Image (cartoon, rainbow, N blue to C red):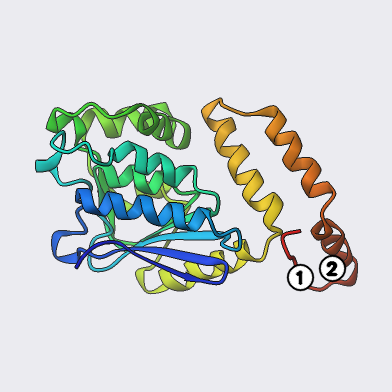
Amino acid sequence: MGIPELTIDGAVARITLRRPEQANRLEPDDLAAIAAHIDAVNAKPEVLVLVLQAEGKYFCSGYDIGRIGASRDVAFDEVVNALEDARPVTLALLQGSVYGGATDFALACDFRLGAQGIDMFMPAARLGLHFYRRGLERYVTRLGLDAAKRLFLTAERIDADEMKAIGFLTQLVPAAELAAAGQRLIGTLSGMAPIPLVGMKKHLNRIARGTLDAEDLRRDMVRAADSGDLKEGQRAWAEKRPPRFTGS
């Protein structure tokens, strides 16, 4: 009970956090399950969108504080990095507040949709915890150095409007509209040509980290240029109809 659940429906996969009574606090078994779910999704090329969502009032309160440093079975940062590196485009649906290491889980996603009324904070310095490298990098590259310093060094709690203002949220909507807004974005993403969709997601993230592989980028560009999907996209544009992409 409570282990994150993976569901797959066509081009869309969802990982759901299921410990609402503990504010969806993450335990070692949860990290192992999330890692396994990401591996399973990566093995399915038909999946184009991976949604991270949660049950209950809170999105996630982060890793169990009492277990920090106690278990090395699955390293927290390795799981978050795996989410950022996941093949599909990723979307965090923040129906509730997000705290601690869970903020980095959200930042690891390509899109973050949040509901009015949520908040966030990063208490690492207050706990005596030094955050890991790629987590620091994600904060700086996505939010900017000043915002990263403010959140890490003061442990200040900020509300949803401020989360949107600093770029933590891609989109902020009334709580009642979050599911519909998420579904619209999922529909948009899953309707794109798969080869450039997952390729450009990968290379944009690498550019942000300063790790671009120019040869891998060239291969993906050639693959897209030679694809039937490019011809289909051109035909659909000329015929003013939705394209029917196959990923080939």
Q: Quadrant of the N terminus?
A: bottom left
Which amino acid type is marked by label 1?
Answer: Arg
Apparent side of residue 34 relative to residue 201 in the rendered image (left or right): left
Residue at the image position 78 percent from the left and 49 percent from the top: 224
Apparent side of residue 216 relative to residue 127 in the rendered image (left or right): right
In the rendering, which numbered label is found on residue 85?
none
Choose top left, top right, bottom left or bottom right for residue 245.
bottom right
Residue at the image position 82 percent from the left and 62 percent from the top: 233
Choose top left, top right, bottom left or bottom right for residue 44.
bottom right
In the rendering, which numbered label is found on residue 244?
1
Foreground disc of the pair 2, 1? 1
Q: How many marks are shown on the rendered structure? A: 2
On screen, residue 94 above or below 140: below
In the rendering, which numbered label is found on residue 236?
2
Residue 125 pos. (x, y %): 18, 29
Q: Earlier in the sequence, mark 2 or mark 1?
A: 2
Tell me the crowding category of disc 2: few under 14, some 14 to 19, or many 20 or more residues within 10 angstroms, Cα based: some
Q: Quadrant of the C terminus?
A: bottom right
Residue 174 pos. (x, y %): 38, 68
Q: Residue furthest left?
A: 66
On screen, residue 45 above or below 144: below
Residue at the image position 27 percent from the left and 48 percent from the top: 120
- Circles 2, 1 touching at the beta carbon (< 8 Å): yes
